[in-house]
Image (spheres, helix red, strand yellow):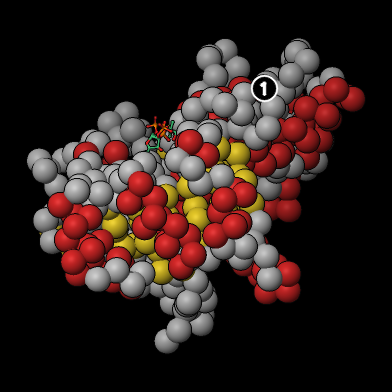
């Protein structure tokens, strides 16, 4: 069966996490992704957080599936000539170097356009144009600069970063969308274009509801669904702990076994349409008609009392027992699943969201497969390439003969 991006060639100049997330998705959609790496070490993540000596790390293998790897010294004159051929050969160049690195290499937007006017040049940078545009940025910097950290955590504690890689993987996702849109537009214009996804912008986009709340706060000075209510609010959106971001109040409650299992918790949502069912399940039937609890507005200043009663009930159940019982009444809730539980979850294996991959030097390992499922473009997750595994193959496709390839190798260009 064909794939959505069959025939699209990507010059993948990405490293670490944000850019590789993007090009991995494109590869899963069928693009031919040619990863260009420095000879010797390659993408720095190959050697980072290694669990097996001298074997590509999980950091690398889990972000570079379905790609081909070419080693090339793109700062040498011969390397630049090969890179020019690659620019002419490919549809999209994706990079997440520090600001200015591509220009310093001699591959400015203008130069790339001269070589291939159809080329789409897609970049992840830490910040968009402005005072910080020259800064190098990593995940947690983006979380802090994009509004996530100031709105995550508890009111009486410091700002917190989240485990979800919204700065790196989140921005990679944004960039992938920009690239497919640019490929679509190119069908009518015949031209490439620049696509930029800044990590600060990507994080702020994912924190959109908090900018919504900033404006509500400025107008009304309180936000009734926040745990601070009915107390005092400052001028900026406060950290809301585990309170639900939407109009339906929610919280994390303890379940049976929480004393020894750090993940024996459940997210519980006191959704208004099922209030009667909630009262029945937790044994608070009187609250169905009690004017202090019967309506969502009446409950807002009493949410602590409501959730204490819910927890009193959940403490008698495991998170899975509680979920099963609550689901029988359509009460929205979710168990706090550990990575250990997710790795073993059969339904995620069945859909290919968690896959086992075989690697020649590492052996079998688990990875997250393509979270986007397409009926006409199924994903087969193939292992990440070894460093330079496809150098000869790709150079031959560019028209280089065996003797030229040998000469480049002798001069350590590849
Ligand atoms: N051959 C020769 N040189 C190469 C090369 C190759 N194949 N590939 C890369 N290089 C060079 C670059 O040209 C650059 O050289 P220069 O600084 O002399 O211009 C150099 O390697 C290092 O690249 P850089 O991107 O600066 O790496 P770094 O390790 O110093 O910084 C980041 C890493 C992630 C902080 C930085 O790349 C960055 O801010 N990227 C944008 C934001 C981003 O994606 N951050 C999240 C990462 S998950």
The one nearer the camera, 413 or 356, is 413
Image height check: is 388 above or below 257? below
- The answer to which image quadrant residue 214 occupies is top right
Report if residue 329 is visible in the image: no
The one nearer the camera, 44 or 3, is 44
Report x, y in % for residue 344.
27, 57
User: In the picture provided, is 215 more to the left or to the right than 153?
Assistant: right
> At 61% from the left edge and 28% from the top edge, which residue is drawn?
133
Residue to which mark 1 is pinned: 131
User: In the picture provided, is 165 more to the left or to the right than 176?
Assistant: left
> At 56% from the left edge and 54% from the top edge, which residue is drawn?
112
> In the rendered picture of this protein, how many numbered marks are placed on residues?
1
User: In the picture provided, is 187 more to the left or to the right than 346?
Assistant: right
> At 46% from the left edge and 31% from the top edge, which residue is drawn?
138
Report x, y in % for residue 318.
37, 45
Report x, y in % for residue 61.
27, 52
The one nearer the camera, 221 or 176, is 176
- The answer to which image quadrant residue 256 occupies is top left
How many other residues sit within 10 Å of disc 1, few (<14), some (14-19) or many (≥20)? few
Report x, y in % for residue 163.
44, 36
Report if residue 208 is visible in the image: yes
The one nearer the camera, 205 or 399, is 399
> At 18% from the left edge and 66% from the top edge, which residue is drawn?
403
On the rendering, which quadrant does ligand 1 occupy? Answer: top left
Residue at far bottom of view: 1
Image height check: is 375 above or below 325? below
Q: Secondary structure at mark 1?
A: loop
User: In the picture provided, is 337 more to the left or to the right than 143?
Assistant: left
Image height check: is 116 above or below 146? below
């Amino acid at each position: 069966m064909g794939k959505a991006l069959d025939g699209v060639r990507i010059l993948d100049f990405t490293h670490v996490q944000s850019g590789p997330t993007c090009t991995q998705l494109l590869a899963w959609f069928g693009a031919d992704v040619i990863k260009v790496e420095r000879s010797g070490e390659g993408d720095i993540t190959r050697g980072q957080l290694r669990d097996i000596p001298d074997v590509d790390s999980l950091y690398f293998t889990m972000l570079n599936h379905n790609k081909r790897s070419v080693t090339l010294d793109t700062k040498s004159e011969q390397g630049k000539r090969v890179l020019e051929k690659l620019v002419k050969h490919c549809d999209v160049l994706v990079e997440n170097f520090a600001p200015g690195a591509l220009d310093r290499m001699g591959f400015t937007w203008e130069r790339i356009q001269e070589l291939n006017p159809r080329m789409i040049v897609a970049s992840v940078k830490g910040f968009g144009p402005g005072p910080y545009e020259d800064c190098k940025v990593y995940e947690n910097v983006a979380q802090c600069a994009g509004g996530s950290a100031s709105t995550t955590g508890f009111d009486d504690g410091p700002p917190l970063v989240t485990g979800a890689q919204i700065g790196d993987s989140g921005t990679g996702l944004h960039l992938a969308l920009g690239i497919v849109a640019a490929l679509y537009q190119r069908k009518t214009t015949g031209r490439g274009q620049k696509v930029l996804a800044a990590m600060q912008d990507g994080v702020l986009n994912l924190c959109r509801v908090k900018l919504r709340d900033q404006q509500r706060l400025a107008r009304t000075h309180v936000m009734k669904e926040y745990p601070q209510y009915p107390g005092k609010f400052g001028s900026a959106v406060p950290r809301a702990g585990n309170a639900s971001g939407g109009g339906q109040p929610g919280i994390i409650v303890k379940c049976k076994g929480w004393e020894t299992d750090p993940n024996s918790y459940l997210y519980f949502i006191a959704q208004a349409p099922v209030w009667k069912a909630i009262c029945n399940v937790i044994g608070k039937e009187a609250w169905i008609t009690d004017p202090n609890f019967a309506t969502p507005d009446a409950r807002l200043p009493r949410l602590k009392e409501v959730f204490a009663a819910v927890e009193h009930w959940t403490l008698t159940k495991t998170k899975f027992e509680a979920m099963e019982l609550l689901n029988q009444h359509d009460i929205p809730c979710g168990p706090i699943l550990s990575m250990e539980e997710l790795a073993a979850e059969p339904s995620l294996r069945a859909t290919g969201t968690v896959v086992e991959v075989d690697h020649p030097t590492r052996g079998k390992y688990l990875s997250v497969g393509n979270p986007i499922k397409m009926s006409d473009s199924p994903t087969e997750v193939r292992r990440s390439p070894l460093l330079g595994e496809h150098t000869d193959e790709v150079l031959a496709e560019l028209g280089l003969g065996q003797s030229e390839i040998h000469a480049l190798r002798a001069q350590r260009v590849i």
